[in-house]
Image (tube, rainbow, N blue to C red):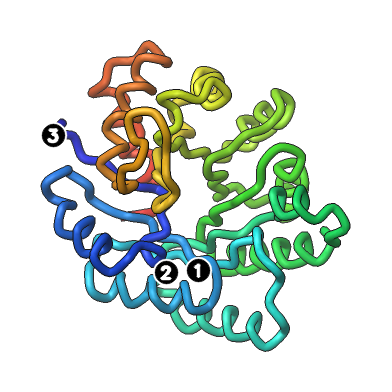
Amino acid sequence: MTQRIIDAHVHLDMYSDKAQEQILKELNTFHIDHLISVSNHVSSARTNLQLAHQNQRVKPAIGFHPEQKLPDEEELQQLFSLIDRNKEDITAIGEVGLPYYLRKDAPSLKLQPYVDLLEHFIQIAVKLNKPIILHAIYEDADLACDLLEKYDFHKAHFHWFKGSPATIQRMMNNQYFISVTPDCLYESEIQQLIEQYPLRLMMVETDGPWPFEGIFKDKLTHPKMIHQSMMTISKLKGVALDEVYQQLYQNTIRFYGD
């Protein structure tokens, strides 16, 4: 495939140095224009900023991944300060959201502090007029929608989203974006979402280095996998492959800016 693609959600900082070098070296080979590299915490954000400084195709986002213990006040202030100092250089606020899987493992976990932190990140996104990248699935997505609606903020990207038909409709009404991972080749839940969600509100991602199954089993998660995702989306939507490439590329450019 010669069409250009953008990986709308990847954790480039989490790859080994060797894998990072390989991926960055192969961007031209596989027609990958940009990588939206999201952060998990302060040190993650610092690494992403460094990677972006070394290669302009890496577009860094700063946030705090919710599937972990909340940071203490000092760490939070370091994170907020990092965002403020680099507000001209970051592409988005993210990855942020709510701890769905963490609560499955620890049902006694208090959710409200995570909700409060998410609201603070939304406030920052509003203030800076930056897109926000969300980890909010199933019932957590409704809580995220509540907060986004509270601030009338629509620059929201729900990555690897899963949720109820009612939530999907709510997100479509609010013009929120979703992104699709390579598991669209074999996961029926994701395939159904693709069929329902408008192509004009869709992007593609890897969430690398997260591993995948099927034809990708035991392979390094690489942005080139998005080409297979594109073919699956084209088939499921009944839209010409070239049109899918063009639409999703323009979606991502328009949402994140070039």
Quadrant (top left, top right, bottom left, bottom right) of the N terminus = top left
| Amino acid type of the residue tagged 2 in the rendering | Ile
Direction top: furthest residue: 238
Which disc number belongs to residue 62?
A: 1
Residue identifier under label 2: 90
| Amino acid type of the residue tagged 3 in the rendering | Thr
Circle 2 or circle 3, nearest the eye: 3
Circle 1 or circle 2, nearest the eye: 1
Can you give x and y, in whole percent of width and height, for residue 204 in the image?
Answer: 39, 39
Mark toward the start of the polypeptide (1 vs 3): 3
Q: How crowded is the residue under tag 3: few (<14 C-alpha within 10 Å), some, or many (20+)?
A: few
Q: Relative to 220, does residue 123 appear above or below in the rendering?
A: below
Whether residue 255 is visible: no
Secondary element type, mark 3: loop
Residue identifier under label 3: 2
Q: CA distance from mark 1 to mark 2?
A: 7 Å
Q: How many marks?
A: 3
Direction bottom: furthest residue: 74
Mark toward the start of the polypeptide (2 vs 3): 3
Instruction: Give the side of residue 67 with respect to residue 89, left or right.
Output: right
Can you give x and y, in whole percent of width and height, for residue 107 in the image?
Answer: 84, 52
Instruction: Give the side of residue 179 with respect to residue 52, left or right.
Output: right
| Amino acid type of the residue tagged 1 in the rendering | Ile
> For the point 42% across and 69% down, which residue is it?
90
